[in-house]
Image (spheres, rainbow, N blue to C red):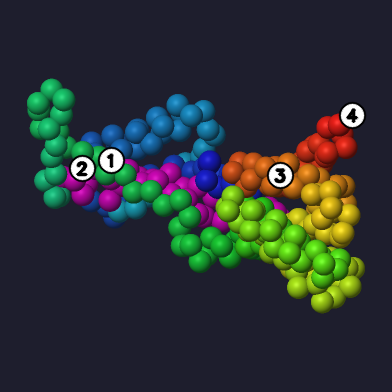
């Protein structure tokens, strides 16, 4: 749940898949394994259904299906409880009481096939990846050549913080630079002119929210870093106080 939510998937369907017709292992092993999975879901308080006979041949499993933006469900995550392989390999460990016990093997796949998962992700967000995942998180748009060095300094500072910030070459008019950045699905843009260079600020624009006003460089980078760490989008950047508000 924690991992999938970071990718923007917060609607799920959970199923407990039970013993199929063709399987290995005793009834007791299957009953214990199924009870363990059901008990884990009950402890978390999650709702789930039952897929009779949908388990693997060696053990029952929890299947998690994510829902995309248009309501389609996709099988991705699975947790399988395997009592059979430890028995077949005669695996043992010494418990705290000094007795030999047989371990339980848990197979866990969060994404399933990575290629398939990212295909689902790109479809779900129409190519507009979450801020923390997008290749370029902010692009600096210089109005004149005289602010190129300032832009490079800001980008270098951001990169040291682990943020992915690039500087536009500035060969196009500002409107074209903004349009190119938006078409490139870049979530945050910063217009940089002589005024911003002299004041140590950036005029920030969000792809989703439009113009967000002028921000002190350090305050902006701190907010970008926070959003990157907690997997939030840049819509909250408007809450960051700019220098003028702080002085008041």
Q: Nearer the viewer, residue 103 or 61?
A: 103
Please, what secondary structure does the residue beneath circle 2 have? loop
- Label drawn at residue 168: none
Circle 3 packing at 10 Å, graded few (<14), some (14-19), many (20+), is some
- Report x, y in % for residue 124: 67, 58
Please, what secondary structure does the residue beneath circle 1 have? helix
Q: CA distance from mark 3 to mark 2?
A: 63 Å
- Report x, y in % for residue 106: 31, 44
| Residue receiving disc 3 | 218
- Report x, y in % for residue 145: 82, 70
Mark closer to the observer (3, 1): 3
Q: CA distance from mark 1 to mark 4?
A: 68 Å
Q: Residue at x 55, y 47 (%)?
A: 4
Residue furthest to the bottom in view is: 171
Please tell me which of labels 2 and 4 falls first in the chain: 2
Please tell me which of labels 3 and 2 falls first in the chain: 2
| Residue receiving disc 4 | 248
In the depicted structure, whether residue 52 falls above or below residue 47: below
- Report x, y in % for residue 56: 34, 53
* Magenta span of residues: 58-87
| Residue receiving disc 1 | 30
Please tell me which of labels 1 and 4 falls first in the chain: 1
- In this view of the protein, can residue 75 be seen by the observer? yes
Q: Quadrant of residue 103?
A: top left
| Residue receiving disc 2 | 26
């Amino acid at each position: 749940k924690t991992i999938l939510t970071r990718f923007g998937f917060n609607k799920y369907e959970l199923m407990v898949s039970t013993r199929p017709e063709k399987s290995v292992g005793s009834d007791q092993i299957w009953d214990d394994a199924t009870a363990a999975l059901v008990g884990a879901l009950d402890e978390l308080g999650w709702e789930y259904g039952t897929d009779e006979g949908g388990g693997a041949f060696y053990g029952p499993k929890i299947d998690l299906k994510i829902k995309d933006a248009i309501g389609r469900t996709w099988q991705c995550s699975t947790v399988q409880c395997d009592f059979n392989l430890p028995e077949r390999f005669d695996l043992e460990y010494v418990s705290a009481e000094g007795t030999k016990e047989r371990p339980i093997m848990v197979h866990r796949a969060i994404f399933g096939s990575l290629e398939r998962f990212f295909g689902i992700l790109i479809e779900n967000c129409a190519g507009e990846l979450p801020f923390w995942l997008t290749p370029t998180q902010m692009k600096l748009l210089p109005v004149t050549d005289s602010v190129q060095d300032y832009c490079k300094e800001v980008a270098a500072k951001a990169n040291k913080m682990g943020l992915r910030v690039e500087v536009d070459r500035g060969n196009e008019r500002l409107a074209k630079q903004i349009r190119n950045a938006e078409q490139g699905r870049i979530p945050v843009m910063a217009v940089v002119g002589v005024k911003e260079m002299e004041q140590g600020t950036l005029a920030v624009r969000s792809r989703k929210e439009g113009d967000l006003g002028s921000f002190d460089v350090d305050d902006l980078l701190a907010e970008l870093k926070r959003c990157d760490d907690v997997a939030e989008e840049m819509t909250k950047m408007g809450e960051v106080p700019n220098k003028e508000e702080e002085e008041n």
